[in-house]
Each structure stands twice: as structure tokens, then as C-alpha cells.
């Protein structure tokens, strides 16, 4: 299991080192010379062999008083300074050895090594601080898989393969593809990738709940649709391309477009108290015309609140559609948002 302990230990060590730096108050002025930049403090002394906090940024000057840039070993630590001399922080990319190398510097300017969690994603750095860019790497006896941007594939799908929250393959939750007779069917890689893209757009906390309760995704390409409703004024039909089966715990879909709507129905079934408390059905009835026009549903579907919620959820995941929902049916969107956000990224219910 991935742990934060290593990164935290490094950060604690670096904090102690930073706290021990010999520093001087800012308030001086820069002095450009032919050899490089110097800094003259407010008391007119030249900054030499010291760290300087200047307007919120850290700089280091060598023993001759020149501002340092690039990589430098100071004491027992190795630091990187930008072209303007400021200590590097956060994500940085440098051209080294004929290619681009990514680093992450903590608030003390130290390059992170081993595991880093940033904005909900995990990354692994070599001992020299360079971000791992290999798609597959064995770390401490376990094999992990990574995206092209270096982030760990975790709680998501790569093709039909599922990788759990620790980044390890979990075949029990892989997507299945079945013929009408139930036998397994082979699927092209581009279709697998398209399906994975839809699955990975689902809220991570709800995906965890779905899988922890032993639900499965089943692709049924030979079946055009699961149900249909006729438009009375046009004669054609509205096709439902997903189906939730509680007894066998499956979400079946005939095309990638059916995944989000079907998953929205799963959320609806698991947030009944929220639907009741905030009167989703009443709000949906009040905005019936707007919803029907927005979703393009026939009259016979307008009393199926689970279907309506699922179709709205599918649009909710698209920023443009969500903006339209905010304009046309703000109260309905608010209730839907309460349901979606009622579960945290760890899969646990949020405290109300």
C-alpha cells in the first residue's frame, strides 16, 4: 500500500534544515555586475555565502556574493534555483541529458523522492528527484502502472483492466464484454479505451462504492438497446442503452454513451434519503417541460425519476451541459449535486 510516511519524513527533515539557515532581513537592492547579480542589504553589506528572503522568495549567494542559479549543493542538500535566482518550488521541468526531466520541489526547495500525492494523484520519483515516466515499474516488490504524465493508474480503468486505489490490478472488477448468449466477446482496443474514458469520468468515491459492493460493468455490443419508449407525436422511439440489475449486481450497457446514465441511476438508488429530503421528484415535476426539452425524452418517460436522474447525471459531468442546467433548472441541479457530492473521494459518505 502506498504511504505518505516517506515524503512526510523528508519534509520534516528539510524543515529543520530550512529553519537553521543563516538569513538576513530583506530591504536592500540588487547590484548587477559583469560576473552576475549581487544583493546589497539594507545595512549596505554584501550578501555572501548566505540565504536571503527577498520579497517572499529564497535566494542563495556564493562566497563571492554572486546569486546562484541552476543546481547547487549547499551543506548536505542539493537545491535548484531558477534563472532569476529564486529557489525552485512545485512542479518544474528542465532539459537534461537530451530530454525533459520533471521534478517536484517542496516548500523548502527540496526535490521530493519516492511517492508524492498531489491533487489526488500519486507520482513516484527516483532517488535523484526525477519523476518516473515508465509506464510500468516494480517498486519494493510490487508492480505499478503509470499514465503518460507520470501519475499512477489508481481507482480507474486502463482499457478493460481495473487498478485499485493502491495502483494494483484487480481482475475481479475488470469490465466484461458479452454476447447476447452470455459468452465472452473480444473488443477492439480503441473501443476499450473509449469505454475506459467514460468510466474514468465517474466520481471516484461512487466508483469505489460501486465496486466494493461487487457491482460489475458489462459491455453488450450485440444488443442495440434494453428498452424503448415511443414519441407519440413523432412515431419514432427513445432508446435506453443501459440496464441496472440489482440481483446480479451489473450495469450493462450497449454503447459507451450508456455508462454515465446507468451509473447515475445507481447513485439515485443509493441516495433515496437525499431525494426525499430535497424533493427531487417535486422539483423535476416543476421543471418538467425544461427537463423534457433538455433531455429529449418522450412523455412516457417523464414519471421515471430514476431514468431522469441518470440522464441528468450524464449531462452533469459535462461542464457545458451543467451550465445549461444551472440556467434552465437550477433547483434540480442543486438536488442532483447534493446527491453526487454526498460521498467523498474515499468512497465514504460525507457528514451532512
Image (tube, rainbow, N blue to C red):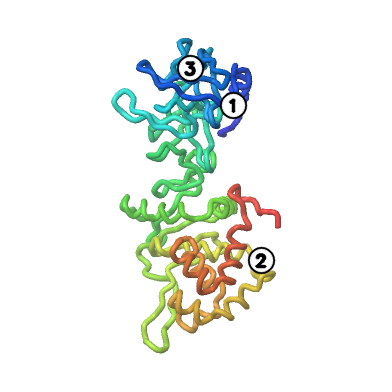
The vertical placement of 79 against 253, above or below, is above
- Please tell me which residue is depicted at 39% across the width and 27% down the height of the picture: 83
- Please tell me which residue is depicted at 41% across the width and 74% down the height of the picture: 239
- Image quadrant where residue 283 sits: bottom right
User: Marks 2/3: CA distance?
Assistant: 60 Å
Estimate the x, y position of residue 48 in percent, counting from the top left: 51, 13
Q: Earlier in the sequence, mark 1 or mark 2?
A: 1
Estimate the x, y position of residue 63 in percent, counting from the top left: 48, 10
The mark closer to the camera, 2 or 3, is 3
**Helix, strand, or loop for circle 3?**
strand
Q: Earlier in the sequence, mark 2 or mark 3?
A: 3
- Please tell me which residue is depicted at 53% across the width and 24% down the height of the picture: 28
Q: Residues within 10 Å of mark 3 (few under 14, many from 20)?
A: many
Give the left or right position of residue 252, taking residue 22 as reference: left
User: Marks 1/3: CA distance?
Assistant: 24 Å
- Please tell me which residue is depicted at 32% across the width and 50% down the height of the picture: 189
Q: Residues within 10 Å of mark 2 (few under 14, many from 20)?
A: some
Residue underneath mark 2:
274
Q: Quadrant of the C terminus?
A: bottom right
In the rendered structure, find residue 11 and report the number of the disc placed on it: 1
- Contact, CB < 8 Å: mark 1 with mark 3? no
Residue underneath mark 3:
61
**Helix, strand, or loop for circle 2?**
helix
**Helix, strand, or loop for circle 1?**
helix
Q: Nearer the viewer, residue 126 or 50?
A: 50
Looking at the image, can residue 44 be seen? yes
Amino acid at each position: 500500500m502506498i504511504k505518505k510516511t516517506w515524503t512526510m519524513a523528508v519534509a520534516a527533515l528539510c524543515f529543520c534544515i530550512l529553519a537553521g539557515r543563516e538569513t538576513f532581513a530583506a530591504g536592500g537592492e540588487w547590484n548587477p555586475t559583469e560576473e552576475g547579480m549581487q544583493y546589497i542589504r539594507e545595512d549596505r553589506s554584501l550578501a555572501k555565502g548566505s540565504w536571503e528572503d527577498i520579497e517572499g522568495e529564497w535566494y542563495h549567494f556564493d562566497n563571492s556574493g554572486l546569486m546562484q542559479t541552476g543546481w547547487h549543493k549547499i551543506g548536505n542538500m542539493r537545491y535548484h534555483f531558477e534563472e532569476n535566482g529564486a529557489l525552485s518550488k512545485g512542479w518544474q521541468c528542465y532539459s537534461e541529458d537530451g530530454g525533459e526531466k520533471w521534478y517536484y520541489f517542496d516548500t523548502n526547495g527540496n526535490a521530493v523522492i519516492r511517492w508524492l500525492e498531489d491533487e489526488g494523484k500519486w507520482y513516484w520519483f527516483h532517488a535523484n528527484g526525477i519523476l518516473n515516466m515508465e509506464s510500468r515499474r516494480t517498486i519494493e516488490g510490487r508492480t505499478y502502472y503509470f499514465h503518460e504524465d507520470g501519475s499512477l493508474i489508481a481507482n480507474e480503468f486502463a482499457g478493460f483492466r481495473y487498478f485499485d486505489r493502491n495502483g494494483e490490478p484487480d481482475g475481479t472488477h475488470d469490465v466484461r464484454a458479452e454476447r447476447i448468449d452470455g459468452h465472452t466477446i473480444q473488443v477492439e482496443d480503441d473501443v476499450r479505451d473509449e469505454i475506459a474514458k467514460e468510466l474514468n469520468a465517474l466520481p471516484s468515491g461512487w466508483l469505489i462504492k460501486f465496486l466494493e459492493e461487487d457491482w460489475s460493468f458489462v459491455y453488450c455490443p450485440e444488443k442495440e438497446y434494453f428498452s424503448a419508449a415511443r414519441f407519440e407525436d413523432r412515431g419514432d422511439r427513445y432508446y435506453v442503452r443501459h440496464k441496472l440489475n440489482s440481483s446480479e449486481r451489473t450495469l450493462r450497457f450497449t454503447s459507451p454513451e450508456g455508462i454515465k446514465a446507468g451509473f447515475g441511476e445507481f447513485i439515485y438508488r443509493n441516495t433515496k434519503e437525499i431525494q426525499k429530503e430535497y424533493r427531487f421528484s417535486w422539483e423535476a415535476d416543476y421543471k418538467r417541460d425544461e427537463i423534457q426539452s433538455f433531455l429529449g425524452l418522450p412523455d412516457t418517460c417523464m414519471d421515471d425519476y430514476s431514468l431522469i436522474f441518470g440522464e441528468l447525471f450524464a449531462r452533469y459531468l459535462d461542464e457545458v451541459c451543467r451550465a445549461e442546467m444551472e440556467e434552465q433548472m437550477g433547483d434540480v441541479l442543486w438536488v442532483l449535486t447534493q446527491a453526487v457530492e454526498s460521498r467523498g473521494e474515499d468512497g465514504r459518505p460525507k457528514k451532512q
